[in-house]
Amino acid sequence: MDAVISGIGQSAVGRRLGRSGLDLTIDAALEAIADAGLTVGDIDGLATYPGAFPGGPPGFSGPGSPDVHDALRLSLNWHRGGIEGSAQLAAVVDAAAAVHAGLARHVLVYRTVTESSAQAQGRQGIGLSGGGGAPKMGGSLQWSIPMRAYSAANWLALNCHRHMHEFGTTHEQLAQIALNARRNAQRNPKAVYRDPMTLDDYFASRMITTPFRLFDCDAPVDGSTALIVSAPEQASAVDHPVARVESVGTALRGRPSWDQFDDMTTMGARDAGAMLWERTSLTPADVDVAELYDGFSFLTMVWLEALGFCGRGESGPFIEDGHRIALDGELPVNTHGGQLSAGRLHGYGFIHEAVLQLRGEAGERQVAPRRGGHPEVAAVANGGGPVAGSMLLVREDGR
Amino acid sequence: MTDLPFRVQPALDDENRFFWTSGEDGVLRFARCSGCDYWLHPPAPYCPSCGGRDVAPDAVSGRGQVWSFTVNHHPWDGSTDPWNIVLVELDEQQGLRLTSNLVGCRDDEIEIGMAVQVTFEERDGVWFPLFEPATGEGSA
């Protein structure tokens, strides 16, 4: 698509910051706008995931696009918000498509969470957080919640267990995703969990839902991430490299269902991964850094397979001992610490990190390809289960 | 049976009422295409296999196999006792699955591939289809 990520911004990220979602969003947005060499008046598009979401999980939605639109007094030619589509990345893909189609020149895209402040009482099951007795469950959730499968943790534990059964994937292999994330987080000053983690620490963390332990589950935080998706000409107006949207994967060719999908070991990632490579001449071997969703550790393994970095069912041996996915490995993964250790910015932390890496601005955790220079190609993936989206970003030098 | 666990009730409507009340006579039912016999779940007014529009509830054997499972330890609903969640694939059709709970066996006895059969737990006019280890013959 003819679109680039011309600027990025991120608010403070942390546990129980006690600030409103809109306040955090303004921080991230103003930083991204300035980074893109623009002013607020230049922004003519606005996109967010999931948009205002009354009744959703506490702190999940962030401000809706009308709130940000009005707070910044934007003058917009195109705007959208919504939770359906190719995972959290849908808002970025829509923005790129809008720019490509000429509906907007500079789209502000953001994702904001205040889940740490809102869930101070602990994480609860879907539909159980309102108080005053649980409502009756309709729609697709009627097939899981009444069976006490209350959380994506439960649903994905079923997928992970099936993967272990079919392919012999081990708990020690699964642990490598969490250990890798924590190693990288130690080099990220904004990560929420930076204490060293050993394999023993991992196995000592409490069981959530077998085979997932606490350290397989991402860490709720407060924070906002923003990016500016611009027409390609903006690359010549900024004094840093930009990230060109080389390809996207928005496919969902199987059933949109958590329990009826044909292949429970990959689900939607399989399709979003396949489509990504159908739209580019690049191949998995060209990727210098991979930022792969880890709402639960197992999902990063799913994405490694779905994006073709290893074969189906082979992600366990691929990450064995963690060397291959480490910062100095052949495919550095989740270089900022992922959502497991850097915090659950819900997909957008991965996009932000991919752009930082391509620009060579990732500080102590900067990936250095063996051929020298900065990374040129980054893969980003969001989502899990029947909700999946992927994106391939390529560095383009600024002026 | 000891104390029943907490359960969220499904919201019954014209499309799903047959499913959630099917257990009243001890039989599990799914929507099925009258033209080509394809089982549809969740219920829908269109058969994706043959394009037929004549879809009606029909009885299944209630037998299947554990496709996957997890033992939950986090107190999502306030309960601190672990409970299992199983994904059961019914014998009738590849990919015809239900998320459910396994009763009549300890959590550490559950295995992927084990043969199970339906049993029902009634709560306020809803018959929750649960599963128990299969007895007799005729399952996977």
Image: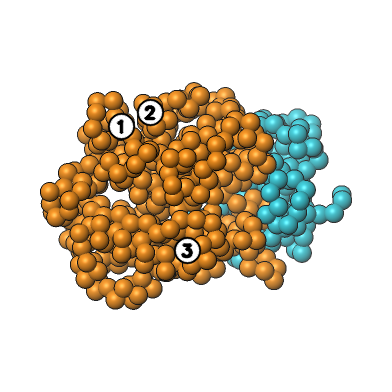
Chain letter corresponding to the colour cyan? B
Residue A262: % across, % down: 49, 39
Label 1, residues with CA under 10 Å away: few <14, some 14-19, many ≥20: some
Q: Is residue B132 visible?
A: yes
Q: Earlier in the sequence, mark 1 or mark 2?
A: 2
Q: Colour of chain A?
A: orange
Chain that bears disc 3: A
State whether residue B133 is above or below residue A386.
above
Residues at marks 3 and 1, CA–CA distance in whole angstroms: 35 Å
Same chain, labels 2 and 3: yes
* Residue contact between numbered discs 3 and 1, judged by CB atoms under 8 Å: no
Residue at 63% over, 31% down: A200
**What kind of element bears circle 2?**
loop
Residue at 72% over, 34% down: B110
Residues at marks 1 and 2, CA–CA distance in whole angstroms: 8 Å
**What kind of element bears circle 1?**
loop
Residue A285: % across, % down: 30, 28
Q: Which residue is the site of mark 2?
A: A328
Residue A223: % across, % down: 45, 58
Of residues A235 and A328, the one nearer the viewer is A328
Residue A298: mark in rendering: none
Q: Amino acid at mark 1?
A: Ala
State whether residue B79 is above or below residue A176.
below
Q: Amino acid at mark 2?
A: Asp
Q: Which residue is the site of mark 1?
A: A368
Residue at 17% over, 44% down: A397
